[in-house]
Amino acid sequence: MTDQTDPRPADAPETPAAGPGTAQRGMPEKRVAITRAARTVFGREGFTRTSVDAIAAEAGVSKRTIYNHFADKEQLFQSVVLEGATAVAATQARIADRHLRKIVDLRTDLLDFGLERVDSLTTFAEHWALVRTIEAEALHIRPALLEAWQEAGPRETHRTLTHWMTDFAERGLLVVPDPAEAARMLNLLTFLAVAQPTFYGALPMPAERIAELVANGVTAFLAVYGTER
């Protein structure tokens, strides 16, 4: 996708650094400032309306400095989206390991797991703002970028959940004919039950209501996959 709103300046480097290691040499603190600013501005303004000038102003750097690190606005957007998606997926994998490796009471452990996953809507608020941007502007974002985000974030988390559904079936904790479908169902009934009505944390929801939604989701999940159906 060509950045029509922010053409490269004539004095920008012909071959900008593409890899994280290369781009960070010399001015790592400026790259950090740029990505932090990009996350903020993209989350607030969206992809289409954001300009490189606005990101430069937010970061306190020149526009040329941004082009020293990123080829164009799209590459910068992809960088911050994938960075956030990878961090969220890794965090959710650790949450799953903490709650699901050693089951004491399946219902309680699934509930605690679901509630801590929902906490990531606050912990990674800037990333979920980018997810709102992706969903709102999908038609204006290249399919390859959307695919990369899906692979790094949602699909990676789905793979983690599928692993645990397989593990639960092998331990006799659940009856799971299709672990991937069970993973999708658990995600839909617990995490997305809170994420979607709050627009990924943008709209506040009382803690009591969150707990109720997640608990209802766990009950519905166990009604389908529990051994005591």
Image: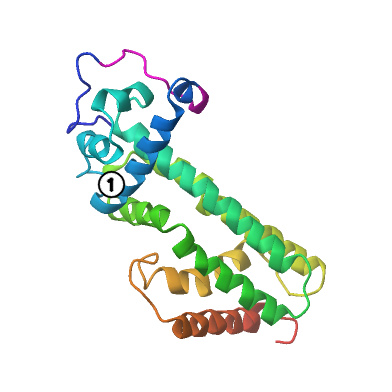
| Callout 1 amino acid | Val
Magenta stretch, overall SS: loop
Is residue 144 visible to the viewer in this orientation of the structure? Answer: no
Quadrant, the C terminus: bottom right
For residue 206, above or below residue 49: below
Among all residues in the image, which is located at the extreme right? 171
Q: Is residue 197 left or right of residue 94?
A: left
Say which of 145 and 14 sits in front: 14
Magenta residues, start to end: 12-21
State the image coordinates of residue 25 (x, y, percent, origin top left).
48, 21
For residue 29, above or below residue 147: above
Q: Residue at x 36, y 71 (%)?
A: 198
Q: Residue at x 31, y 14 (%)?
A: 13
Q: Quadrant of residue 176?
A: bottom right
Among all residues in the image, which is located at the extreme left? 5
Tally the marks: 1
The answer to whether residue 169 is magenta is no
Residue of label 1:
41
State the image coordinates of residue 223 (x, y, percent, origin top left).
63, 84
Q: Residue at x 39, y 78 (%)?
A: 205
State the image coordinates of residue 153 (x, y, percent, origin top left).
51, 50
For residue 82, above or below residue 132: above
Label 1: element kind? helix
Crowd around label 1: few <14 · some 14–19 · many ≥20 (10 Å) = many
Q: Is residue 197 left or right of residue 151?
A: left
Is residue 215 visible to the viewer in this orientation of the structure? Answer: yes
State the image coordinates of residue 30 (x, y, percent, origin top left).
39, 30
For residue 129, above or below residue 21: below
Say which of 178 and 109 sits in front: 109
Q: Quadrant of residue 18?
A: top left
